[in-house]
Image: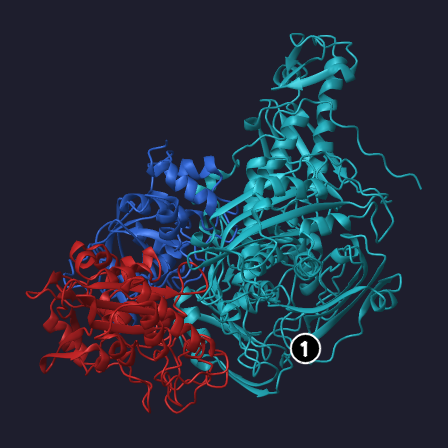
Chain colours: A red, B blue, C cyan
Amino acid sequence: MFPFTYTRATSVHEAIEAGERGGRYIAGGTTLVDLMRETVERPRALVDIVGLPLSDVSATPRGGLRIGALARMADVAADPVVRQTYPAVAQALELSASAQLRNMATIGGNVMQRPRCAYFRDVSAPCNRREPGSGCSALEGYNRTHAILGTSEHCVATHPSDLAVVLTALEATVHMVGPEGRRATPIGQFLLQPGDTPDREQDLRPGELIVALEIPPLPRPLRSGYLKVRDRESYEFALTSVAVALHIRGGVIHTAKVAAGGVGTIPWKLPAVEQHLVGRRPSPDLWAQAAERAADGARPLVHNGFKTELLRRTVERQLRIVGGRS
Amino acid sequence: MSTDVQEPELQPEEGRPSPLSRRTFIAATGTATGVAVAAGVTGSGTRPVSATEDVASELADGTTSQVSFLLNGRRQSLVVDNRASLLDLLRERLDLTGTKKGCDAGACGACTVHVDGRRVNACLTFAARLDGAQVTTIEGLAPDGDLHPLQRAFIEQDALQCGFCTPGQIMSGVACIREGHTESPEEIREWMSGNICRCGCYVKIVRAVDHVATGGR
Amino acid sequence: MTPQPAPRPARQPQAAVGTPRSRVDGRLKVTGQARFAADHGPADGIDGIVHAVLVDATIGRGRITSIEARAALAVPDVLTVIHHGNAPRLPYRDNSFPDSIHPPGERLRAFQDNHVRFFGQPVAVVVATTLEAARHAARLVEVTYDAEPPQLDLVTAPAHEPDIYTRGDAAAALASAPVQLEMTYRMGRNHHNAMEPHAIVARWDGDRLTVWEKTQWVADPRNELAAVFGIPQAAVRCYSRFVGGAFGNSGRTWVHSVAAALAARELRRPVKLVLSRRQLYFGIGFRPAYEYGVRLGSERDGRLTAVVHDVRGETSRYERHSDDLALGRMLYDTPNFRQDVRLVPLDVNTPTWMRGPGWSTTATALETSLDELAHELGIDPIELRIRNEPADDPATGQPFSTRRLHECYTTGMREFGWHRRSSRPRAVREGDWLIGMGMAAGAYPAESAPAQAHARLGADGTVVVRSASSDMGPGTTTSMAQVAADALGLPMWSVQFQLGDSMMPPAPVHALAWTMASVGSAVQATCDRLRRKAVALAVGDDRSPLHGVPADEVVVRRGWLHTRADPRRGETYQQLLARNGRTHLEAVGGYEPPEEIRYSMYAYSAIFAEVAVDARLGIVRVRRMLGVFDAGRIVNPKLADSQAHGGMIGGLGQALLEHTVTDPRDGRILNANLADYLVPTNADATDIRAIYIEGVDNEAAPIGVKGLGEVVQVGVAPAIANAVFNATGRRVRDLPITPEALLMPR
């Protein structure tokens, strides 16, 4: 691990100032410390923001949910408001990592997680995300866990977050504050596909800090849930995962929010699936038809071809679980 | 750097190495800072102080921090290398080797300790961040000579073999019970899955946690 | 030659052996006071420890062209960087069997040349006064290479000459068999992933070296380090009291131990070196990957007429590690059998034994193939096995000492509810889950090796028994105390068994499930001798209440020596020693296996598994497992259960999760961490149970045990694989079985 200075920010203002000077924010640290130890991350200055008052979880006036960026995963998962209004958020959190890590990691950091790609994590391997222009080792290497959607010739790494899949499905907004003031952007635009600049993972400007994630109000009653498919029963990143939220009224689906994890370079919104659902009556056939659209545009690699079919099936399963059999 | 730097109680002359050995320094309970006392106390290794070391440069670049925290009920005030994890600090500097390093990456749970009452992975916790924290390790779980009920249950159920993951399992299990994630064996299994046991004692670990959670019924 | 008669069965009452005892070092382990290799330091009188970190090669094969250490040396607190360019040439005396268990070949040497033999090979070691500085500096050592493409393909790489076993005429019998099957199984490379990383603290005092080492055999670091440094074995002492799991990975001394000892010698300071989890994937051995071809010929009634195994297994280019793949030769009555085993040298580090070594590998192929045959013929898999049950060992013609495999089957069928299994695959469904049951059999040799022990009875009536064995988790410290307690007629609390010091009486490597048979028999013999000494002292002492009583008539219970006929007539060890002015009595004893083996001796397993497979998503969860074991006498059922659970959970990992992934371009290991190399978690282990078909086997060992630690993993993976077939109708012949193999059409 490279040496670094360490300061604790006592206010948001102080943090931003330090961030602007090139300081790297550390919150829960569960990703950052690990990657610093591997020397994938080499910050020269760490700015500890975990003590800032940004951990409130509250319902917004019209029934949305605002989660402070520094709220711990465990606390958000246990929060009664979260469990009542957006149970999928709690489910995704409790299916993530381990109890210990959830006690440490924050919501903002969770969304900011960096890829689990073995080549990214190994500084002796070429990796465009770590070292732009060095090449992508995964394209022709071992890529079972890699993405089939949103990939580019420069990077095929999967975004590892579970929570971000739910936030993407529910079209959450990322609230930030920085030297230029406050700013908000939809999570679908906040997290960036690799494209030609795989090293740029978020729409975050120098000194900017996530302060909260806000899920907009959705029509009620809302059924929602998160399903995660993985090799072992616990403590593993997703092979595929799906977040679904449905508002069904009068036997017709009025609102459908669907996104998938484990398959995209960012959590993957599935508008084609959503569109197929809206205005139709729930039925097993509908779930199957909608799920057929889930992998549209997928570009499988040598070892992850199974994800195309697994994704469709995961979507179908979760639509059925959330939407019911009839 | 932490904001309130108290007056050092031990203040050798500026620019000269501390005459204090590392051990003496740790034993001192007061908060200390300044250039000189940092000599020989960075990092997690044992190092006698040498006169040739350029002490000033060590703190000048700010890569060490002063921290003061409660460890198993006793105050620790020391200067740490910012890179030192709580795990390495415990093991290599404070000789508390009950907390184990299994993966050093948050993937096995062997280093589980309690920070401010919550179970965390000590390997991913920078010691520099602990100023003001309360830390409990396996050594501080029960008063000297006594055993926590879960420690007893682990022995009774034989919820261990090699014993390497055991301190982490127990620290995790104590928290799991406190959190109330013990309604069923399934729930215990899930909430204890952050602790890998390669000897495969899971069935008995669940029994031990369940035994204590249900009041030893 | 007359075989050495087994010592008479102990006439002592058995109060401790056979009873469920809590482990005696449990308290040390649950309080964190048990000190593993890396835990040694000031509390053990080792002061001034400095930290060593290895630098690993980043090519798969080739030569080092330069090493630039200036940046590393410039890091404050860094003491040295040692590499082939500046390391002294070490003597590297030959160190072969029986002093070591190295496989044949040229062992890997520490910084003696510029060859890179595999990705991750240590090319330098950095030492600093702090761990942080050492770790950082290790990243700053710049190494340039002349890389060559490594050979990593098990299937296409040239193999060594095959090792052939044959009996009968398998080819002819196969050609004429009414039923013929041909399958190829592939088993991924597995890493032990014991929770304790390999670690060593090395200290030189003049020309004497002391190491606190993670090892399953304290003699091995002693012998190896003595050979490497060209010093007498007596100049090296190895301590290893607690071992944080090993499963075979600490049987031999790896190169990092030499690096640590070398650094300590160069610096004249104690050096601690702990491998990172990542380094454990190339710094120590692994269970090799296999391609295992099986051809079966049988009659219509299922009786096997011909079995052919064609095996390719990986080894390194510099050593020939070979697993013992003999299960197929002895498990079933097969008149015509041929097995060709080809070792394929690859640019990898040398594999080593891993739990159930070889036997669990063969079990996967053999026991899956039997399941395939049973399905083909429409015969129940257990019935098929019973029809092929041999009367005598088909490989040697020798009678079995004990073989209760049939009883394992019947017990397992009853206890597991085998009758509920549908013989038709994919017939049981619960919601989204397809349910299936499978079983497999296994065996593991009941072997033993010479061992010695020393016992010392103190004037306070307590005894200390010592042998240079090891305890990586099974509870050796406890079970040996049980044996000693009964042999001496003492309560458990007054007996202490000590191990893990190369100065103690020698014991064999703590592996192969033979510690109880070997060291246990030595402890028994030693303590019997000590007891007889005490009895002789008493009956010859005219002041003893036992004076004149025939020695054979004296037994000891709870420290009270008395006559068999009259428990009131006697005295305590303390009284005896005090009256005779003795501070202690001691005895040295040992065990030698008989020179002539007259019996075929194995422990057996019958494993039953029930799995649920998500019909659409392909994920497999093991719902229940039962292992029924014929392992001879069970010394401590409580500890035995833990071992059995562990073996079965290890087998679960083998079947469904574990697979070390190597990049074929450069040998880089891509899942060298515990987040990506998946081992079972608590949530994966649901209902796991073990049953023992009890029975003493006095041919296998004087104390009647056949060994448990290995056989508990033999047959687990195929039982699960067979259950997956029963659930889904899909036969997966590659381990681990992952969801992609089971994404079945609707």
Image coords of residue A11 (percent x, y):
11, 68
Most foreground residue, A92 or C126: A92
Most foreground residue, A117 or C176: C176
Q: Amino acid at mark 1?
A: Val
Which residue is pictured at 66% across the width and 71% down the height?
Answer: C108
Which residue is pictured at 42% across the width and 44% down the height?
Answer: B206
Position above or below: C609 against C76: above
Image coords of residue A197 (percent x, y):
31, 89
Give the position of the C terminus of chain A as an image quadrant: bottom left
Q: Quadrant of residue C99?
A: bottom right
* Residue A41 appears left or right of A254: right
Most foreground residue, C18 or C285: C18
* Residue A182 appears left or right of B144: left
Q: How many marks?
A: 1
Most foreground residue, A61 or C177: C177
Q: In this view, which residue lies farthest toward the left?
A: A61
Image coords of residue A238 (percent x, y):
38, 68
- Residue placed under numbered mark 1 in the picture: C155
Q: Quadrant of residue A130?
A: bottom left
Pointer 1 local density, CA inside 10 Å: few below 14, some 14–19, many at least 20 = few
* Residue C63 appears left or right of A95: right
Image coords of residue C563 (percent x, y):
71, 12
Residue B107 visible here: yes
Which SS class for mark 1?
loop
Give the position of the N terminus of chain A as an image quadrant: bottom left
Which residue is pictured at 58% across the width and 52% down the height?
Answer: C422
**Which chain is disc 1 placed on?**
C
